[in-house]
Image (tube, coloured by chain):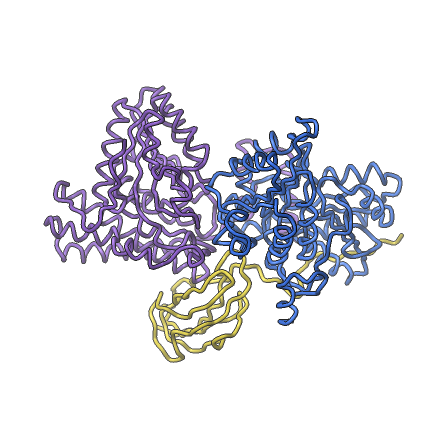
Chain colours: A yellow, B purple, C blue
Amino acid sequence: MAEENITFTLPDLGEGLVEATVLEWQVAVGDTIGRNDPLVEVETTKSAVVIPSPKAGRVVELHAREEDVVPVGEPLVTFAVEVEESAPQAGIVGRVPEEEAKPKRRVRLKPPTD
Amino acid sequence: MPPQESKGQGAITVEHLPPELTRRLYRDMRTARDLDTEAIALQRQGVFPAYVSVRGQEAAQVGSATALDPARDFVFPTYREMASALAYGVEMVGYMATHRALWHGGLYDVMDSRFGAINAVVGGPVPHAVGWALGERLRGDDGVAMAYFGDGASSEGDVHEAMNFAGVLAAPVIFFCQNNQWALSVPNERQVAGGSVAARAEGYGMPGVLVDGNDAGAVHTATAEAVERARNGGGPTVIEALTYRIEPHSTSDDPGRYRDEADTEHWRRRDPVVLLRAAMLEAGHADEEHFAAVDAEAARRAEQVRDGVADAPEPDGSELFTHVFRETTEELTRQHRTWQEEVEL
Amino acid sequence: MTELIERADTTVESAVVELSMQQAINRALRVLLTEDPDVLVFGEDVGALGGVFRVTDGLQKEFGDQRVFDTPLAESAIMGMAVGLAMNGWRPVPELQFDGFAYPAVDQIVNQVARMNYRTRGAAPMPITLRLPSFGGIQAPEHHGESLEALFAHTPGLKVVAPSDPAEAYSLLLQSVRSDDPVVYMEPKARYWDRRPVRLSEPTDPIGTSRIVRPGRHATLVAWGAMVHRCVQVAELAAEDGVELEVLDLRWLKPIDAAGLAASVARTKRAVVVHEAPLTAGLGAEVAALITENCFRELAAPVQRVTGFDVPYPAGPLEPQYLPTIDRVLLAVQRTLEY
C-alpha cells in the first residue's frame, strides 16, 4: 500500500454559495480519521454545517484557520491516504464554477477594417 | 370519516405480521437509512450539489412500496422517495444519479422499473397516476397505480383534480400522502385546512385512511388493503401516513429559521427503524445475530451505491440534443453542430 | 465599508453601500412596504424562512404576518388570490419560488392577471408585481432554472423586466411595484450573490428604457439578466484584440426599448443578441426584428443570436454547455465583423 496526499477543497454547500467561514476544526494535524468522521464546522450565508471527512486517512495540513473565510474551490485540508496502486481516484470537486478573475477564451477576434 | 389520528405514542407491534415480511421491511429500511446517511455526506463532500433526506420516513415509504407488485403496478414518485424506490427494486445508482445532477429524472429505466422519473413538480405526477390506472381498467388489466405526494402538494389543484377524476372514473389508484408535517418552512396547520388530507377522501367518494407513518407494519397493512380493493375493481383510496421530516427540507436549507429543533425530539425518538427492530425482537421475528448480519449487509450495499454514483461518468455534452425528440429536426441538428464547433475549437 | 453598510440598514437613499442583489431587492421591498400600506408580500416560504434565496429575509418580523405571509403550496392560487386582492384595493407583490413553478400559475397570469384591466375597460387595474427567481446558471434541479421571458412578453397586458445588477434590481423593483400595470419581475438567480458597492437610487428612466453598460464602437451586444455580466466579460476580452464592443442591457423585455436599440446599432452597425432561453421564438428574434426594421440601411451584418439550444435546461454538468459561453459569443461577434 502506497501513501498519497490528497487535498480536499471547499465544496459548494448550497446552490451557488461562494464561500464559507471556518467555525471550528474537529480534527488536528496528525489525527487519523475515518471516512465521514466530523471534519470541520463551517458557516455559510444559509446555515452552519459540519462537513464529514471525504477520506479515511491522516490529516497532513489544515489550509484555513478558524474564522477564516474560505472561497469555494480553495484548499481546506490535505490528507495522506493509503491507496492501492489500481484504486480509482474518487473525484471530489467544487460545484460552483469559479468566478475567474480572468475568464477563459479560445476565440480571438480580428478588428474590422471599416 | 377517517380514524382518529394515530400518532402512535410509544411502541409498535408486529406480532400479527409474518416474520418474513417484517424482516424484509427492516432490511430495506435499514439500507435506505444507510444510503441516506451516505448521501448527506456526499453532499457535504461536494459530490452532490444538493440532497433531500428521507430520514424518518422509511417506514411510510418501505411499508407502502412493499405492498405493491413491481411486475404489474406502477409508482409515480416525487423527489423524496428514495426508500420507496429501493424497496420497489429500482436500480439505485441510477436513482441516486439525479442527486449528483447527472440527469434530472435519474438514470434508471423508468418503464422497466415501473417507477416513474423523479419529479420536482409537487402534485404534478398525481394526475399521471390516475391516467395510468384508467389505462389498466380500460384494457381489463389489474395493475394499480401508486401516487406519492406530500402535505405541501396536497394544496395543489392538480391533486384535487386527480382525486375527483379517480372518484368519477373508479380508477385503481392509491393517493399516498406522506404527511411529514413540513412543506419546506410551512407547518401542517398553515398548509392543510381542516387538518387532515385523509378526510378529503370522503368528499371525493372514496375511503380515506390515516395511518401511523412510523409504523412500517401498519403502513404495509393499510396499503395492502387499498391495493386489494383497487385490484378487485373497488376504486381509489387516500392513505395519509403521518410522519415527520427529521432533516432539513434539503441540504441547502436552514430549519433553525422556522422550527424549534427541540420539537423534533419526539419524532427522533420515534425513529421508525428503531421501533421496528424493537417490535421484531419482542415478537421473536429476529434475534441480535440476525440484525448484526442484516445491518452489515445494509451498510455494504449503501457503500456500493455510494461509490457507484460517485464514480459514475458525467454524461457527454452531446446528450443535450439526444432525447428532445424521437425524430429530431433539421434545426436541432444544426444547433448540435454549433455546439460541436465550440467543443472542437 | 462596515460603517456604510450599517448606515444603509436605515435605508439612507443614495448612499454607496456594498450589497448583493438579494439584499438590494430586500431593501427595495422594505422601502415599498414602508411607503405604501397597501403593499402585500406573499408566497411560499417568504415569511419565517425569508425565502429560499433570503430575498424576503426579516420582512415578516418588521412588517408583521398580515403584510408578509406564507401561503399554502399552490402557485395558481397565489396568482389568483393576487387578482382578488388587487380588485379589493391592495398592491400585491407575490413571489413564485422558482421559474419552473410559474407554469402551474400560467392560467391565472395569462388569462386573468394580464387582461383584467382590459376585460373591465379599466375599472379593475392589476397593480401586481410577480417576483420570479429566474434563469439558470446555478446547476439547480429540474424546474429550478428556466427562462420564461418570451412567454410573458408575448402576453398582452403584462410588462416584463429583468435586472442585471444590485443597483438596477433595487430601482427597477421600486418602479415595477409602483406601476399600476402588472409586471413580471425576473430575478437572475445566478447573480443573487453578486456583491458590489452600489448607489441605491430612485428610478429615473421611464419604464421601457434600456441602458448602455459599456460603450463601444464595433458591435452592440444586447442582453438582460445574468447574460449582461457574460457580455461584459466578452467585451473585456474583445478589447484585448482591439475590438470595442458596446453592451446594452435591455432591462425591460416588454415594453422593449426599440429607440435605444436603434441608437446603439446605428453607431456600431453590428449587433449580437445573447439570451439563455432557447433560440426558436425566443426574445432574440424580436430584438433582431426591431433592429432590422429600424437600422436596415446602417447594418453591416445580419443580427446574430447566441442563445440556449432548443432543449430543456439540462442537469448540472451539462448546464454550462447549454448556456451561451464566452467563445460562442465571440464566434458570433467574429461572424458580424467578417460579414
Quick check: B172 left or right of C24? left
Q: Residue at x 41, y 29 (%)?
A: B162
Relative image position of residue C93 (x, y in whole percent): 60, 44
Asked if residue C334 shows in the view, the reply is no
Q: Residue at x 28, y 26 (%)?
A: B230
| Residue C304 placement: quadrant | top right
Number of residue marks: 0
| Residue C31 placement: quadrant | bottom right
Relative image position of residue C144 (x, y in whole percent): 53, 46
Which residue is the extreme one toward the left?
A: B284
- Vertical position of residue C262 compared to residue C239: above or below: above
Relative image position of residue B264 (x, y in whole percent): 32, 55
- Vertical position of residue C137 compared to residue B89: above or below: below
Q: Nearer the viewer, residue C43 or B115?
A: C43
Q: Nearer the viewer, residue C78 or C252?
A: C78
Relative image position of residue B127 (x, y in whole percent): 42, 30
Quick check: C277 left or right of B262? right
Which residue is the extreme one toward the bottom?
A: A30
Q: Quadrant of the N terminus of chain C?
A: bottom right
| Residue C30 placement: quadrant | bottom right
- Vertical position of residue C310 compared to residue B342: above or below: above
Q: Nearer the viewer, residue C100 or C244?
A: C100
Asked if residue A111 shows in the view, the reply is yes
Quick check: A26 left or right of C329? left
